[in-house]
């Protein structure tokens, strides 16, 4: 028999990770400031507008 033949049931590559890893990531609590994503987007847009206005008026 050839060394290249795979055993029955053996796959060529491992299956991709399931969603359990993602769920575990979001369940972990870390230290630091907690900011909602909506607030982060609003602050980023406000900073962009402030920079544009500063270039126009100053």
Image (tube, rainbow, N blue to C red):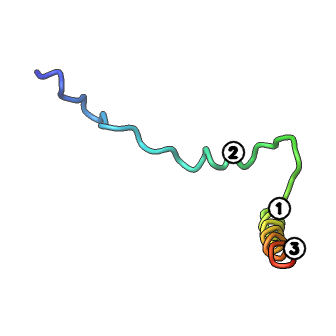
Q: Quadrant of residue 9?
A: top left
State the mark number for residue 12. none
Farthest residue to the left: give it.
1
| Residue under numbered circle 2 | 25
Mark nearest the camera among 3 and 2 is: 3
What is the quadrant of the N terminus in the image? top left
User: Could you tell me residue 5's position as x and y percent?
Assistant: 18, 28
The mark nearer the N terminus, 2 or 1, is: 2
Q: Is residue 20 depicted above or below 13 in this figure?
A: below
User: Could you tell me residue 31's position as x and y percent?
Assistant: 86, 40
| Residue under numbered circle 1 | 36
In this image, 53 relative to 9: left or right? right
- Tell me if mark 3 has few (under 14), some (14-19) or many (20+) residues whose alpha carbon lies within 10 angstroms of its own: few
- Identify which residue, 52 or 21, lies in the foreground: 52
Q: Give the residue drawn at x 80%, y 63%.
A: 40
Q: Give the residue drawn at x 25%, y 28%.
A: 7
| Residue under numbered circle 3 | 58
Mark nearest the camera among 2 and 1 is: 1
User: Could you tell me residue 53's position as x and y percent?
Assistant: 83, 76
Dot 2 lies on which element?
helix
Q: Are marks 2 and 1 in contact (CB under 8 Å)?
A: no
How far is mark 1 from mark 3, CA to CA?
Answer: 32 Å
Q: Is residue 27 depicted above or below 54 in this figure?
A: above
């Amino acid at each position: 028999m050839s060394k290249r033949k795979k055993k029955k049931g053996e796959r060529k590559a491992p299956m991709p990770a399931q969603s359990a890893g993602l769920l575990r990531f979001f369940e972990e609590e870390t230290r630091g400031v907690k900011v909602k994503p909506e607030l982060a987007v609003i602050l980023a847009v406000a900073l962009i507008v402030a920079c544009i206005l500063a270039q126009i008026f100053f």
